[in-house]
Image (cartoon, rainbow, N blue to C red):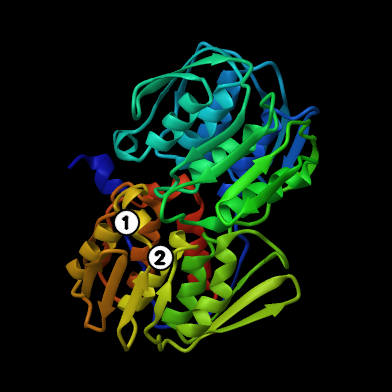
C-alpha cells in the first residue's frame, strides 16, 4: 500500500445531529457529455452553462478536442466551436461509459484512424454492441473490446440497424446522438430481451429535439433520427439528480432535512425518481419553490423495488436498505454487473463486510436487517460505491472509505459538500 493510497482513504463522518442543510449540486454528467457531443457536430457554436467539471467530462472534452473540436472552458461554462473532425487521434476513455460508447460513433464522422483505450477496468466493460453496430454501418473497426481502432471515413450512409443493447442503453444513445449527421439518418431496433435504463434514451431523444433534430421513439424498442442540422446556441445543464441521492439519503439516516437547490420541475434524469422511491423508505419529500426537500426521522423502512429503469440509483437504495428495520429486495438490475465494477457483487460484499446480511439474486439483491460495525469499505474504482459507504458511515462509526478520490468521476466536490451538509444541523 503506497502513501498515496492511504491519503485517499477517508474516514466517513458519523453524526448524532439531525441535519438542516441546503446543497447546490454540480451539473449532470449524463447531460454534460451528451451536450458536448452534440455541440461538436452542431452547425453553429454552442455555449454550455452549468457544465459538470469532473473526470468523466474532462475525458470527453479532451476526446472531442483530439478529434478537432474547439472547446474553451471558463469555470463551468464551455464554448464549443465545431470544426472538421479528423484523425489520427488516440482517445483515452478512462472508465467513462459515455466516452467509450459515444465517441466511437462520433469518430465515424472523422477522417483517419482513431485509437481507443482506457483504464484497465474499462477493458472489462461491455463494448461488443458498439463495435458490432459500427461494422453494420460499414465502418472498419479493429478489435473486439478496448483497446480498439476505428478507420473513420467522414461519411456514413446510415440507414436501419438492429442491435442488442441489453448490457447498456448507452449503445443506443451513442448512435442516436450522431445519427442526424449520417447521410440517410438512422433507424435503430433493439433485439435483446431486456433494455436497461430507458430514461437515458429518452434523455438523448429530448436533447436532440431541443436542438431541432427530428428524433423519435418509433416503437417499444425502436428509434429514428432523420438527417439534418444540429443547432448550437446557449444551453444550461441541470444539476445532477443521481448525485443528489447520497445527500437525500443522509436526511433519512441522520434525521432532519436536506434541501437540494434548483431541482428541475420537468426532467428526463432518472435521479428524479428519488421523489417517489424515498417516500417508500419512510421519507417525506416536498417541492419547495425551485428546491426539493427530503425530511427523515432516522427510521428507514425496507423496500421491494424494481430499478430496471433507474439502475444507477441502486447503490443509494442498497445503502439505505442496509440500515432499514425490515428486509428489502432490489430487482431488475442484472445489467449493473457491467458498470464501473460488478456493482451487485461489490455492494453485497461490502455490506456483508461491515456486518450486513446481503445476498445476490440473478437480477438484484436481498438485504436483511442486521447490526453493522466499522471497517474498510472497498470502492472498486467506482464513485457510487464510495458514496454508498459514506451513507452507511453516517450511522456506523468507523467506516473507512478505501479511495474517496474515485468520486472525482462525477462529483469532485463530494467531500466538501458532505462536510458542509454535516455542519448544517437542527
Q: Residues within 10 Å of mark 2 (few under 14, many from 20)?
A: many
The spot of residue 401 in percent (x, y) is 30, 58
- Closer to the camera in the image, 292 or 135: 135
Which corner quadrant of the image does residue 334 belong to?
bottom left
Q: What residue is rendered at 50% in x and 33% in y? A: 59
- Closer to the camera in the image, 243 or 145: 145
Quadrant containing the N terminus in the rendered view? top left
Q: Is residue 308 left or right of residue 272?
A: left
Q: What residue is rendered at 37% in x and 54% in y? A: 335
Q: Secondary structure at mark 2?
A: helix
Tags 1 and 2 touching, CB below 8 Å: yes
Q: Which residue is mark 2?
A: 314
Q: Earlier in the sequence, mark 1 or mark 2?
A: 2
Q: Which residue is mark 1?
A: 343
- Closer to the camera in the image, 58 or 88: 88
The vertical placement of 359 against 120, above or below, is below
Q: What residue is rendered at 64% in x and 17% in y? A: 155
Query: Visible in this render: residue 54?
Result: no
The spot of residue 62 in percent (x, y) is 55, 27
The spot of residue 294 in percent (x, y) is 57, 79
Quadrant containing the C terminus in the rendered view? bottom right
- Closer to the camera in the image, 414 or 185: 185
Amino acid at each position: 500500500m503506497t502513501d498515496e493510497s492511504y491519503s485517499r482513504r477517508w474516514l466517513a463522518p458519523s453524526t448524532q445531529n439531525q441535519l438542516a442543510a441546503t446543497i447546490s449540486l454540480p451539473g449532470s454528467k449524463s447531460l454534460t457529455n451528451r451536450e458536448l457531443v452534440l455541440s461538436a457536430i452542431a452547425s453553429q457554436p454552442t455555449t454550455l452553462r452549468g457544465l459538470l467539471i469532473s473526470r468523466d467530462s474532462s475525458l470527453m472534452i479532451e476526446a472531442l478536442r483530439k478529434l478537432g473540436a474547439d472547446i474553451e472552458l471558463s469555470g463551468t461554462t464551455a464554448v464549443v466551436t465545431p470544426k472538421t473532425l479528423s484523425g489520427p487521434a488516440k482517445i483515452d476513455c478512462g472508465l467513462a461509459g459515455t466516452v467509450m460508447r459515444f465517441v466511437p460513433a462520433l469518430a465515424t464522422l472523422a477522417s483517419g484512424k482513431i485509437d481507443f483505450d482506457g483504464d484497465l477496468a474499462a477493458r472489462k466493460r461491455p463494448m461488443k454492441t458498439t463495435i458490432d453496430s459500427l461494422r453494420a454501418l460499414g465502418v472498419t473497426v479493429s478489435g473486439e473490446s478496448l483497446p480498439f481502432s476505428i478507420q473513420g471515413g467522414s461519411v456514413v450512409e446510415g440507414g436501419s440497424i438492429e442491435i442488442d443493447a441489453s448490457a447498456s442503453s448507452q449503445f443506443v444513445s451513442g448512435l442516436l446522438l450522431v445519427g442526424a449527421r449520417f447521410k440517410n439518418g438512422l433507424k435503430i431496433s433493439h433485439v435483446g430481451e431486456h433494455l436497461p435504463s430507458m430514461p437515458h434514451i429518452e434523455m438523448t431523444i429530448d436533447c436532440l429535439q431541443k436542438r431541432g433534430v427530428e428524433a423519435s421513439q418509433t416503437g417499444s424498442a425502436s428509434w429514428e433520427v432523420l438527417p439534418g442540422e444540429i443547432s448550437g446556441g446557449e444551453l444550461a445543464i441541470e444539476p445532477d439528480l443521481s448525485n443528489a441521492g447520497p445527500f437525500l439519503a443522509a436526511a433519512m439516516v441522520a434525521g432532519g432535512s436536506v434541501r437540494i437547490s434548483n431541482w428541475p420541475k420537468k426532467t428526463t434524469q432518472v435521479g428524479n425518481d428519488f421523489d417517489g422511491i424515498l417516500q417508500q423508505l419512510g421519507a417525506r419529500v416536498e417541492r419547495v419553490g425551485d428546491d426539493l426537500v427530503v425530511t427523515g426521522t432516522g427510521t428507514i423502512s425496507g423496500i421491494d423495488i424494481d430499478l430496471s429503469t433507474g439502475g444507477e440509483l441502486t447503490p443509494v437504495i442498497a445503502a439505505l436498505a442496509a440500515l432499514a428495520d425490515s428486509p428489502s429486495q432490489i430487482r431488475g438490475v442484472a445489467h449493473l454487473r457491467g458498470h464501473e465494477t460488478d456493482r451487485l457483487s461489490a455492494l453485497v460484499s461490502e455490506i456483508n463486510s461491515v456486518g450486513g446480511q446481503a445476498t445476490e439474486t440473478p437480477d438484484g439483491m436481498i438485504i436483511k436487517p442486521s447490526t453493522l460495525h466499522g471497517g474498510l469499505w472497498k470502492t472498486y474504482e467506482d464513485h457510487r460505491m464510495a458514496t454508498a459507504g459514506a451513507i452507511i458511515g453516517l450511522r456506523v462509526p468507523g467506516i473507512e472509505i478505501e479511495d474517496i478520490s474515485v468520486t472525482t468521476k462525477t462529483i469532485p466536490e463530494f467531500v466538501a459538500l458532505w462536510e458542509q451538509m454535516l455542519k448544517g444541523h437542527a
